[in-house]
Image (spheres, grey):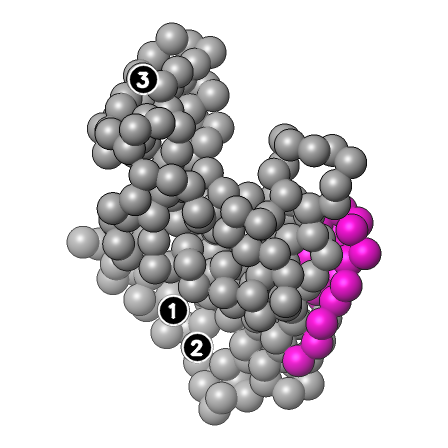
Amino acid sequence: MAILDSDDGMGHSALISATEHAIKLAQQEGLGFVSVKNTSHCGALSYFAEMITNKGLVAIVMTQTDTCVAPHGGAERFLGTNPIAFGFPVENSHPMIVDMATSATAFGKILHAKETGKHIGEGLAIDKNGYGTTDPYKIENLLPFGQHKGSGIALAIDALTGVLMNANFGNHIVRMYGDYDKMRKLASLVIAIDPKKLGNPVFAKTMAQMVTEFACR
């Protein structure tokens, strides 16, 4: 277990360092658990998950973001898109990577809808009064995926990153496109697991079987 202080530096660099250290810990002890504090936007989490799977390890990577999502049943923002990624090595194939935000859609798609003059799908966002809208110009907040399920997972990610690191959470997080004189001080978490240390030397082989059976459905 380790804590990495990014010292308000680039999130990409901080997460690479955290991932490399998590890999080292997992190879030594079976589990690498590295919390990152005082960081910033780090890009796609799948990149770091794949770094871990390339070493034959299982990956779990998550980060908090500034708020743009209203909790299920609420009208005001309190959650970020708070993404999480999972990675699994697969024998003789690409790794299985799951990289997802906990919002029903990406905020970038709202911006794209504005640029193209198109509406978004239903059930993705709400207006300033808390009513659902498909008009990108009326959108005030995004909605979580899976209603209460997405809300719960987003909240858990904020707890495992921001609260665990005694950092900001929810609406206390500095906005990405807000006051540029303030440091964002985000928190992230990188976990690497060595299946062999858990007594499973054929994990990647079994994953290949699982992925094949899944793809046939």
Say which of marks 1 and 3 sits in front: 3
What residue would you read off at disc 3? 135
Whichever of callouts 2 and 3 sits on the residue coming sooner in the sequence is: 3
Residue highlighted by disc 2:
203
Whether residue 136 is situated above or below residue 157 in the rendered picture: above
Residue occupying image coordinates x 43% and y 14%: 114
Q: In the picture, which quadrant includes the N terminus?
A: bottom right
Q: CA distance from mark 2 to mark 3?
A: 47 Å
> Looking at the image, is mark 1 or mark 3 earlier in the sequence?
3
Residue shown at 26% from the left, 54% from the top: 148
Residue 185 place in picture, x, y as percent = 69, 52
The residue stretch that appears in magenta: 1-20
Which of the two marks, 2 or 3, is nearer to us in this view? Answer: 3
CB under 8 Å between discs 2 and 3: no
Q: Sort mark 3 into few (<14), some (14-19) or many (20+) by Cα contacts within 10 Å.
A: some
In contact (CB < 8 Å): disc 2 and disc 1: yes
* Separation of residues labelled 2 and 1 (CA atoms): 6 Å
Q: Looking at this rendering, what residue extends furthest in the bottom direction? A: 199
Assign a secondary structure to mark 1.
Answer: helix
Q: Position of residue 69 (x, y in %)?
A: 41, 41
Q: Which disc is residue 165 wearing?
A: none
Instruction: Report if residue 75 is visible in the image.
Output: yes
Q: Which residue is mark 1?
A: 207
| Residue at the limit of the structure toward the left, as seen here | 217
Type of amino acid at the residue the image marks with label 3 = Asp
Q: Nearer the viewer, residue 91 or 86?
A: 86
Q: Amino acid at mark 2?
A: Phe
Res 95 seen here? no
**Of the pair 147 and 200, the residue shown nearer to us:** 147
